[in-house]
């Protein structure tokens, strides 16, 4: 009796294993896309808002300085 698996059976088992691994990878990519990227986008938006506030305050201070020097 031959206890060795045929090449077709080995290939079938490997395909099933690869399909399982692909499913896990797909779930991780979906999690990154739907969860982590949304949080990063929110944080970047907050940083941009704070940057604009800092630029506006700095620019108004510079304009005030120029006006006072010219007066």
Image: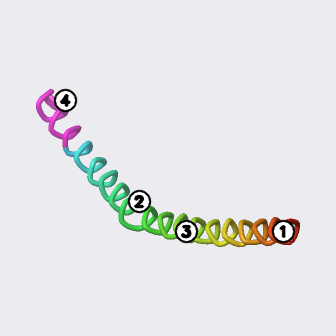
Measured Cα–Cα span from mark 4 to mark 1 = 87 Å
Vertical order, 16 against 32 (above or below) = above
In the rendered image, which residue does mark 1 sit on? Answer: 65
Quadrant into which the C terminus falls: bottom right
Disc number for residue 43:
3
What residue is rendered at 37% in x and 60% in y? 33
What x and y, as percent, mark residue 25? 34, 51
Q: Secondary structure at mark 4?
A: loop
What residue is rendered at 19% in x and 29% in y? 4
Q: Nearer the viewer, residue 7 or 65?
A: 65
Q: Residues within 10 Å of mark 3 (few under 14, many from 20)?
A: few
In terms of sequence position, does the residue under pointer 2 or pointer 1 come before the other?
2
In terms of sequence position, does the residue under pointer 1 or pointer 3 come before the other?
3
What residue is rendered at 20% in x and 45% in y? 16
Q: Quadrant of residue 69?
A: bottom right
Disc number for residue 37:
none
Measured Cα–Cα span from mark 1 to mark 3 = 33 Å
Vertical order, 71 against 19 (above or below) = below
Magenta stretch contains residue 5:
yes
Q: Nearer the viewer, residue 27 or 15?
A: 27
Magenta stretch contains residue 27:
no
- The residue mark sitting in front, 2 or 1, is 1
In terms of sequence position, does the residue under pointer 4 or pointer 1 come before the other?
4
Measured Cα–Cα span from mark 4 to mark 2 = 42 Å
In terms of sequence position, does the residue under pointer 4 or pointer 3 come before the other?
4
Query: Magenta part of the protein: which range?
Result: 2-15
- The residue mark sitting in front, 4 or 3, is 3
Number of disc labels: 4
In the rendered image, which residue does mark 2 sit on? Answer: 32
**Position of 34 compared to 44: left or right?**
left
2 and 1 marks in contact (CB < 8 Å):
no
In terms of sequence position, does the residue under pointer 4 or pointer 2 come before the other?
4
């Amino acid at each position: 009796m031959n206890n060795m698996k045929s090449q077709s059976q080995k290939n079938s088992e490997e395909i099933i294993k690869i399909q399982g691994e692909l499913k896990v990878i797909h779930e991780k990519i979906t999690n990154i896309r739907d969860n982590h990227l949304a949080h990063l986008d929110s944080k970047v938006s907050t940083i941009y808002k704070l940057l604009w506030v800092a630029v506006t305050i700095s620019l108004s201070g510079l304009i005030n300085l120029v006006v006072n020097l010219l007066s």
